[in-house]
Every structure is written in C-alpha cells, then in structure tokens.
Amino acid sequence: MKFPTRKNNSRSGMALIVVMIAIFVFSALAAEFALSMKVEMHLAQKSDDEQQLLWLGRSGVEYARWILSQSASIPSEPYDSLNQIWAGGPGGLGETNSPLNGISMDNFPVGDGTISIKITDLERKVNINTANSATLQQALTLMGVDADSLSVVSDSIQDWRSPPAPPRVAGAENDYYQSLSPPYYAKNAPIDDMSELLLVKGVTPEMFWGTAASGHAPANFQHPKLGLGTAPGQVPDYPFGLVDVFTPVSSGRININTADVNVLQMLPGVETNTAAAIILQRAGPDGIDGTEDDTPFRNVGQLAAAGVLNPQAIAQLNNMCDVRSRTFEVHITAHIGNSSRDFTAILFRNTATDIQVLRFYWK
C-alpha cells in the first residue's frame, strides 16, 4: 500500500486554499451584484415615483382649475368668499346644487396616488408692485414700525421695483447695495417673489415675517416699550409681517370678502372699527368667517347699504376693491407609495372657461 507523500499533501492543501479563495471571491462578487441590482431597482423605482409625483402635481393643478371654474359658473354666487368650497369652506347654497357638492380636496385619489390641494386667493392681499407710498407706510404703521423707518422702507421698496433712477429721499439704489458685504445690485424691476424684500434697505426679518414668525419671542423683552420706538437691544414687536399683507401677483383689487382686518385698514377711509364692521357683516350671525351662515358682499356698493361706509367713500373704493378674486395660489401635496412632494401653482382666472397657469414649481 502506498501512502500519500508530503508533496501530494501540499498540493491538496494548496488546491483547497485556491478553491476557498475562489468561493470567497465569487461570493463577494455575487453579493456586490445583488447590492448593485438592489440599488438600481431602488433608483429606478425612485425615478418612476418622481415622474408619477410630477404628473400627480399637474393633476392637482387641473383639479384646482376645475374647482375654480365650477365656482365661477354659479349664477347665484357672483362673488368669491371664505365660505366657498375652493377656500375650504362648507359651500354656499349654490355650490350644494352644483358638481362641487361633496367633493374632497384632501387625499383625492388619482391613479395609484393621492393629491391634497389648498387654494388661496391673492386678492386678499395688496399688490406690492402697485402699492404707493401711502399704502406702504400705512402697512408699516399698522405693524408698529418706528416712525423714522417708515420712509426708509417705503422709499427703498419703490426704488427696488422701479427702473434705474436717482434714489428717493430715503431710498436706495446700486450705490448703497454695492457698499454692502457681499455686494449686490438693486433689481430695478417688478418684484417676483416676496422674499426679495429681505434684500431691500431697511427691511428686517422681523418686518418681513412678523416678530413671532421670525423666531423671536416679543413677550420676553428686556426693556419696556418707549413711545413709538423701541429701547436699545429690544426686539421690535410686529404682530404681522409684510408677507402677510402683500403679494407680488394679483389683479390689484382687494377682495372685501377675503381680506383680513389688516389689509382692509390699508384702504383709504377704513380704520380699525370700520374694518371690523366689514368682517362682522360678511361673517353672518355667528361672526365667524368661512361658515355656513356667512353673508358675503355681492358688490362693493353693499358696504354703504350696510352702513359700514358712506357713499362718497364707496366711490373711491370702487376702483380699489372687488368681490371677485382673479389670482389664486394652489398648494398641492402629491403622495404615491412612501413618496410625496409639494408643488405650488399660480392661476389667473379671466372667466369660468379661461383659467391660465402662470407658474408651476416645486422645491
């Protein structure tokens, strides 16, 4: 009988090692391939979801256009108000007898996903591109901005949105902005986005957002209020911000059925009590906007009939106010599977059958 030699044993051991290494390499390659396939499938699924989310977002825009079209087609409701379905209200009598009855604006199913939409009219605010000095300063005064800052902010906003020219008395042009660090140029064109105001001379985050929304706590002042100004080191207390009362896009007329108490006070001849009376009149018996018993104004002249304003004031407001809204901001949240995305659209309604998409974007 022959016994294995030491040389044969070495060869067998080497072969075993080679086989083990080969198995290890092939296992690693298989694992890497499986991981790569998993990643590829995930990316492909994500890409597919992104495309579907985009189309869901566009479907949300079309859904909003349909709702606004139907709302404008109701003969018994020749106005836009907060109790209507497009605004999230329960709907007026005319809407309950229209195709809008029973519709949902939350988690509305579309294909394999859902959309939720929120529609806000922009005529509830003042157009920042057409606001004159008096309107700008009235907004700042209502906010409680220091008297010595009123002209600075008002003039600077007008310089920012106007063609190049020597700056207004308290305003600013390129010379001022180029002296900043980092330097930049004045836009000298209409404002497209309200966030531009944060670049304008004199405008602070507190002015733009309002004190509470900007992250400050006005209740924790270290110094007491001193007259119309603020004490050194004191955070200004602004109950609302410029973004709450101005918009860069609108027809230019304020809807007296949707504007809040601050925006109404920016109209000539409308002070605090008058603005409160307008809201109380349109809110109906329960005094709450956006409920079933609302009594929206059907025309601006009804302000006089209701004893809220005199006929002379109405004549002036006819060119500044309306009971219809033309421009709407639509926020759309699209869901599919575990993915979601938010979209925004700006719509302009000429007529019930002519609703244009001015913008459609997402972050």
Image: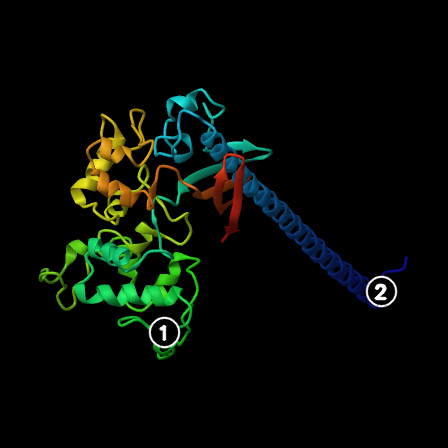
Residue 48 placement (x, y as % from top left)? 63, 45
- Which amino acid is tagged 1? Glu
- From the viewer's side, name the closer residue of 322 and 136: 322
Which badge, 2 or 1, is on the more N-terminal residue?
Answer: 2
- Which amino acid is tagged 2? Asn
Residue 282 visible here? yes
- From the viewer's side, name the closer residue of 39 and 224: 224
- From the viewer's side, name the closer residue of 114 and 225: 225
Q: In the picture, residue 238 is in which quadrant?
A: bottom left
Residue drawn where x is 12% and y is 66% of the image = 231
- From the viewer's side, name the closer residue of 144 and 313: 313
Residue drawn where x is 45% and y is 26% of the image = 74
Helix or strand or loop: what does disc 2 sit on? helix
Residue 275 placement (x, y as % from top left)? 21, 41
Q: Is residue 222 above or below residue 88?
A: below
Q: Is residue 248 above or below residue 80?
A: below
Mark 2 Cα shell of 10 Å, populated few (<14), some (14-19), many (≥20): few
Find disc 1 in the rendering and name its residue. 173
Q: Is residue 242 above or below residue 157?
A: above
* Numbered circle sitting on residue 8: 2
